[in-house]
């Protein structure tokens, strides 16, 4: 017991104590939890990581959002009035904006109240086209093909000057103060999904960008429910309810047979949003102190129970009785996510499209014991992935089976032998077909969980007589290396921010080199399938193309899809209303903190 108390104390010191924000009155409803990875920026065009995006999603407003209770999903108006209106075979979409929505007060507005207008969305999207911003999501907008936007960027690149924000373009226009029109070169039946990502298509005011310049990522100013109050980089982020947030009330449309959803609607319907006053987010990279801070009641919420503590919290997918008695709640869902290994197809060792290079990638895939990863490192909290397609998105088929999930070291060794990857010098390790050294090098992170994965992969590949090496660095540094193509293999995860499965297939679409397509995979047949899928409405014809795309993925193995994670989020009994959104990152406005909270007994 003394040892446990010592661990607890250490966890709190390492975790939240060093980053504690200014004290707040007990009457202020405050949500406290921790991110495992530090934020990068709060400028929407500059970010691509989930954690920075989660903050940004609560500061900025997209035109549309997701119903907080409907499952699997329902897109609903946010700053827009009604549904977007399509015309010209889904090439044109027109959206009306609600009058009377205001940005958070800021010195950039020189003491004036600043209303949200259609031109703000025009400007915000043009920022992605500005080469000076180096926006990670630019390729996504490039593929939408808003008429004139790609040409606007090309002109800026050629002149080596910023984008001309005053230049009108046909595909992105404010028809009047409250009406915006989008025109595309090709039909885009699912375009409204792009307008429901608060972290990407939220509106910014040009005055703010001009006022703060290169430091705009430190001064996010939006029309959303929360405003940044305090920020200590990589340590603590504090947001407070925005005093200028419009009158908005809890509304939702859960399914009739959704008992939990109906109960939440009955409890909260008509409540003013957001229902909490303040959010304090600490950065705790190590799993143990993050878990212990929640266990001790110093955090109200734990986003994804760390795998190494599953046995301390769960039994057969249910919360242990001792934690139930303390009022804790489990929120368990199969995530709209996939964890995968990237092969750099431009690397001279594992890259390329010749039979021996494909055989090496397939052998590594067959030699990775996914079930051991699930039962061991992940403590049973995942299911094998058969492709990169994510659960709950179009194109995903639970009945689809591929060799992605196969563990077959005998077959893997036979493949390596067949293509002349042999041990020529008798040291027990294979060499390349030309006799040069063969070392499989992984990017990894310097944390305890990553070390468990490293140990598993090292043992898996040792059974194939493949030598491994691991290069640890922080996640942002690894991402920079991956974008630059300066790596061999890297394991990472992806989470859907929209219901269309084609988004994850962009990881294999050649125009997305260096952004989503970190594998630098190029295949003309795949690119043609991708372009066909873009313009087709959902249905059997499009599903058939998804199937072909999945088969090409497995055949060339630019990615080895490992698992779909089971999310085990946990909350204290006084945090009410949490449900993990399948696509949106915005959930803080829809939860409440019970003022009569019962303190957790210290253990």
Image: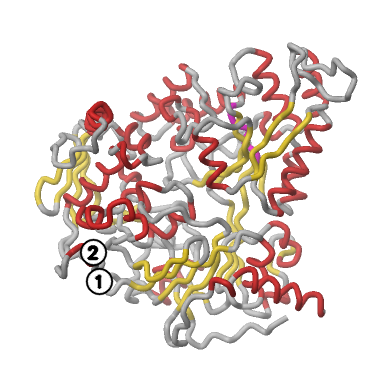
Find out whether the residues at labels 2 and 1 contact each other: C-beta distance under 8 Å: yes
Q: In the picture provided, is 480 more to the left or to the right than 535?
A: right
Q: Relative to 380, is 403 above or below?
A: above
For label 2, the crowd category at 10 Å Cα-Cα, with few meaning under 14, some 14 to 19 and many 20 or more, is: many
- Give the residue number, with chain letter if any, for mark 2: 103
Q: Element under label 2?
A: loop
Residue closest to the far left: 176
- Give the residue number, with chain letter if any, for mark 1: 244
For label 1, the crowd category at 10 Å Cα-Cα, with few meaning under 14, some 14 to 19 and many 20 or more, is: some
Quadrant location of the C terminus?
bottom right
Q: Residue at x 53, y 41 (%)?
A: 479
Q: Element under label 1?
A: loop
Total numbered badges shown on the rendered structure: 2
Q: Is residue 399 visible?
A: yes
Q: Main secondary structure of the magenta part?
A: strand
Can you tell which quarter of the image residue 370 is in? top right
Q: Relative to 176, is 306 above or below?
A: below
Picture coordinates of residue 562 (x, y %)? 65, 39
In this orientation, which residue lies closer to the viewer: 477 or 320? 477
Q: In the picture provided, is 332 more to the left or to the right than 9?
A: left
Residue closest to the far right: 426
Q: Is residue 259 visible?
A: no
Q: Relative to 152, is 271 above or below?
A: below
In this orientation, which residue lies closer to the viewer: 115 or 434? 434
Picture coordinates of residue 241 (x, y %)? 35, 73
Magenta extent? 558-562
Q: Is residue 560 magenta?
A: yes
Q: Residue at x 49, y 19 (%)?
A: 523
Give the image's coloring scheme.
secondary structure
Q: Residue at x 63, y 30 (%)?
A: 488
């Amino acid at each position: 017991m003394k040892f446990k108390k010592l661990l607890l104390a250490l966890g709190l010191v390492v975790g939240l104590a060093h980053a504690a924000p200014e004290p707040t009155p007990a009457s202020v409803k405050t949500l406290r939890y921790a991110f495992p990875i530090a934020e990068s920026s709060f400028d929407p065009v500059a970010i691509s990581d989930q954690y920075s995006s989660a903050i940004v999603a609560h500061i900025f407003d997209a035109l549309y959002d997701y119903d907080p209770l409907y499952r699997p999903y329902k897109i609903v108006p946010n700053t827009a009035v009604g549904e977007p209106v399509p015309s010209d075979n889904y090439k044109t979409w027109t959206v009306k904006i609600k009058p009377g929505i205001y940005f958070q007060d800021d010195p950039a507005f020189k003491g004036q109240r600043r209303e949200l207008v259609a031109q703000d969305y025009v400007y915000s999207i043009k920022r992605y086209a500005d080469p000076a911003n180096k926006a990670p999501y630019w390729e996504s907008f490039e593929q939408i093909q808003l008429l004139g936007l790609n040409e606007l960027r090309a002109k800026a690149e050629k002149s080596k000057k910023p984008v001309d924000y005053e230049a009108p373009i046909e595909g992105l226009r404010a028809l009047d103060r409250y009406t915006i029109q989008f025109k595309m070169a090709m039909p885009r039946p699912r375009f409204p999904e792009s307008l429901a990502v608060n972290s990407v298509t939220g509106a910014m005011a040009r005055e703010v960008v001009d006022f703060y310049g290169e430091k705009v990522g430190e001064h996010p100013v939006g029309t959303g429910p929360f405003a940044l109050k305090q920020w200590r980089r990589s340590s603590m982020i504090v947001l407070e309810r925005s005093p200028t947030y419009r009158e908005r009330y809890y509304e939702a449309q859960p399914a009739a047979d959704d008992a939990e959803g109906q109960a939440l609607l009955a409890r909260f319907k008509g409540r003013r949003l957001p229902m909490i006053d303040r959010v304090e987010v600490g950065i705790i990279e190590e799993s143990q102190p993050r878990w212990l801070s929640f266990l001790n009641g110093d955090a109200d919420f734990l986003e994804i129970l760390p795998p190494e503590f599953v046995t301390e919290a769960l039994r057969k997918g249910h919360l242990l009785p001792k934690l139930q008695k303390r009022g804790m709640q489990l929120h368990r869902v199969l995530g709209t996510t996939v964890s995968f290994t990237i092969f750099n197809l431009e690397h001279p060792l594992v890259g390329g499209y010749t039979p021996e290079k494909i055989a090496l990638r397939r052998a590594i895939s067959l030699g990775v014991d996914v079930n051991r990863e699930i039962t061991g490192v992940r403590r049973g909290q995942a299911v094998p992935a058969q492709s990169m397609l994510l659960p709950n998105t179009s194109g995903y088929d639970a009945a689809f089976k591929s060799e992605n999930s196969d563990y077959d070291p005998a077959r893997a060794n036979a493949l390596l032998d067949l293509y002349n990857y042999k041990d020529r010098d008798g040291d027990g390790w294979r060499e390349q077909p030309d006799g040069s050294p063969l070392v499989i090098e992984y990017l990894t992170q310097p944390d305890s969980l990553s070390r468990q994965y490293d140990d598993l992969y090292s043992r898996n590949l040792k059974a194939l007589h493949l030598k491994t090496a691991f290069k640890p660095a922080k996640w942002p540094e690894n991402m920079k290396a991956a974008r630059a193509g300066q790596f061999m293999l890297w394991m990472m995860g992806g989470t859907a921010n929209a219901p269309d499965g084609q988004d994850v297939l962009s990881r294999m679409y050649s125009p997305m080199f260096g952004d989503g397509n970190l594998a630098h995979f190029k295949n003309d047949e795949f690119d043609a399938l991708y372009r066909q899928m873009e313009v087709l409405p959902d249905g059997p014809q499009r599903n058939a193309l998804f199937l072909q795309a999945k088969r090409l993925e497995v055949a060339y193995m630019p990615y080895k899809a490992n698992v779909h994670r089971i999310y085990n989020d946990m909350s204290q009994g006084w945090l009410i209303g949490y449900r993990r959104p399948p696509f949106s990152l915005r959930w803080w406005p829809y939860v409440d903190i019970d003022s009569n909270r019962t303190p957790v007994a210290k253990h």
